[in-house]
Structure formats: structure tokens, C-alpha cells
Amino acid sequence: MRVTPSVLAFAGLLAGASADMERARELYHLTQYEESLKVLRAIPSKDSAVYDLMGRDYFMDGDFKKATEALEKAVAAEPANSNYALWLGRAYGRRAETSNPFTTVGYASKARQYFERSVELDPRNIEALNDLLDYYLEAPGILGGGMEKARGVVSRISLVDPAEGHWAQAKLDEKRQEFGSAEAQLRRAIDLAPHQVGRVVDLAKFLYKQGRYQEAEQSFARAEQLAPNNPKLLFAKADSYIQAGRNLAAAKSLLERYLEATITPDDPPKSQARKLLRQIAGG
């Protein structure tokens, strides 16, 4: 079989696009969102994966309008992809939070619809379930929120991941100001996943909000033993100090360490750390 030059050229284009996508993903995971976007924009033939990553880059860079535009294209190209629907819901959610009152309702409704669609497409998508839970807990009934809906999502999370289910129940209990039950749920989550630093950090943050500073510090110390210099831990500890108006010098040091740390898109953006530093300076 004779291979024509056009076939070879097409194969070369595919190989180049694949290499570009890998490079763009690498830059994304290094939180270099603008650089990732430059690579993606140069890909001549864009598919759903390209538009999805572009949307995430725009989202993480704070351009939520462009994020929704790119993610709409990803969802249109691959409507059965749960994660594409999830990220489109997130983008509309942030537009709702940052837009004027006349457009908030529409964006919030779209966020809910895409969160629900994401869960419908993949009932085991923990991130989608958690985002849907947050929506139901925070949105008023007129926008589709509500405690009964939240309770249903907690049950679904528990079936997928028992430890995550206890954490979700704690969020629901805290929202209802049932603090004793919330604490018990957080401790049960730790029992089920004792080596997950995030579980211990969740308890420490909760205890700090309750004004139980000594117990909270013990939990933070346990988290440090599990994962020294963990970026999420640095940020959570600093944030807890600032919210309580305590240990502000230590909070400043923690945030400075956070700004020097290597983070991922799963960590709070460094812009949030800078905002907290300005809050300390202003105080």
C-alpha cells in the first residue's frame, strides 16, 4: 500500500497536536495558565479536549466569560462527558458570583443544571457531587437550593466514598448549626482515612471556627506530621489564623511560604494568598 504525502502530513499534524496537548496539560498542572493557553490557541484543529483545557485555563486565570465560552464548545462536542459538564457548571457559578444582579439568576440556574447533568452522567463523580452539594447548601430555594436536596446528595456521596460522606454530612450539620454532630462526622472521616491530611485539616479548621484554638493547633500539628510543608495545610492554617484574628505574624510567614511553594490547580490560587497578605497589612 502506497502512503501518500497528504496522509503523512495528516499523521504529522496529529502527532504535533498530541505533543502540544501534553505540553499544555503540563503547564496547566504547573499553574502556568497563560502559557498553557498560548500552546492551545496555536493548535489548528481543536477538539473537545482542547476546548476543555482552554476553559479550565481561563477559569483558573479568572476569566469566567471566556471559560464558559470554551467549555460550552467542549460540552457541545462531547455532551456525555461528566467532567466537561462539571467545569461548565463551575464557570457559570463563578459568573453568577461576580456578575451584576440582573444576570446572577440566569448564571446560577445554569450552574445548577450543569452540576446536576454532571452527576446524572456519572453518579460516582465525587467532585461533581460535592459541587452540587455546595450549590444546594448555599443557594436559596428560588434558585433550586435546599436542605432536603443537600441531604440526598450526602447520601449519594456516602455510597461512593464513606469518608467523604462523613465530611459531606459534617458540612450539612454545620450549615444547620448542629456543631456537635458536625464534629463527630469529621472525626469519623479521619477514622476511616487516617492518613489523608485533608481530613485532619478539615477538623482543625472547624475547631478554629468554634474558638477551640488549642485543640485546633493539635490537629494542625498532626497534619504537619502526616505531610510537612503541604501547601493546602500552609494556606488553611494561615486562613484560620486570619479569620480568628490571631497569630497574624505566623499567618504572614505561612502565606509567604505558600507563595514560594509549588502548587497545583487543586490548591488555592496564589492570588488568594496575596489577598490574605494584603488583609493582614490592612489590619
Image (cartoon, grey):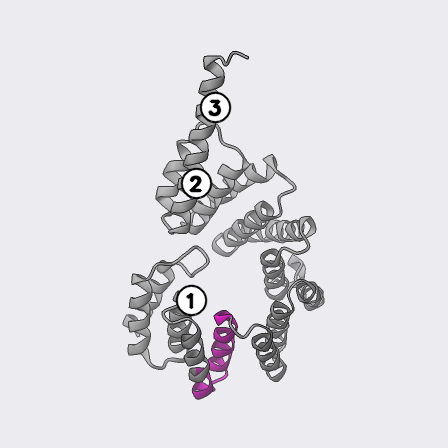
Question: For mark 3, what is the residue?
Answer: 11
Q: Residues within 10 Å of mark 2 (few under 14, many from 20)?
A: some
Q: Residues within 10 Å of mark 3 (few under 14, many from 20)?
A: few
- The kind of residue tagged 1 is Lys
Q: What residue span does the magenta drawing correspond to?
A: 196-216
- The kind of residue tagged 3 is Ala
**In percent of the image, x 42 and y 30: which residue is there?**
16
**In percent of the image, x 38 and y 51: which residue is there?**
31
- Residue 271 left/right relative to 111: left
Question: For mark 1, what is the residue?
Answer: 232
Whole-number angstrom distance, CA of label 2 to CA of label 3:
17 Å
7 vs 174: above or below: above
| x, y percent for residue 217 | 42, 83
Asked if one can make out residue 17 in the rendered structure from this viewpoint, the answer is: yes
Q: Look at the numbered disc 2 and give the secondary structure of its residue.
A: helix
Look at discs 3 and 1 and give the one toward the viewer: 3
246 vs 142: above or below: below
Whole-number angstrom distance, CA of label 2 to CA of label 1:
26 Å
- Residue 168 left/right relative to 30: right
Asked if one can make out residue 278 in the rendered structure from this viewpoint, the answer is: no
Identify the image quadrant of residue 191. Answer: bottom right
| x, y percent for residue 140 | 63, 63
Identify the image quadrant of residue 152. Answer: bottom right
Whole-number angstrom distance, CA of label 3 to CA of label 1:
42 Å
Q: Earlier in the sequence, mark 2 or mark 3?
A: 3
Q: Look at the numbered disc 1 and give the secondary structure of its residue.
A: helix
Indicate whether residue 203 is drawn in magenta: yes
Q: Residues within 10 Å of mark 1 (few under 14, many from 20)?
A: some
Identify the image quadrant of residue 162. Answer: bottom right
**In percent of the image, x 51 and y 72: which residue is there?**
195
* Disc assigned to residue 22: 2
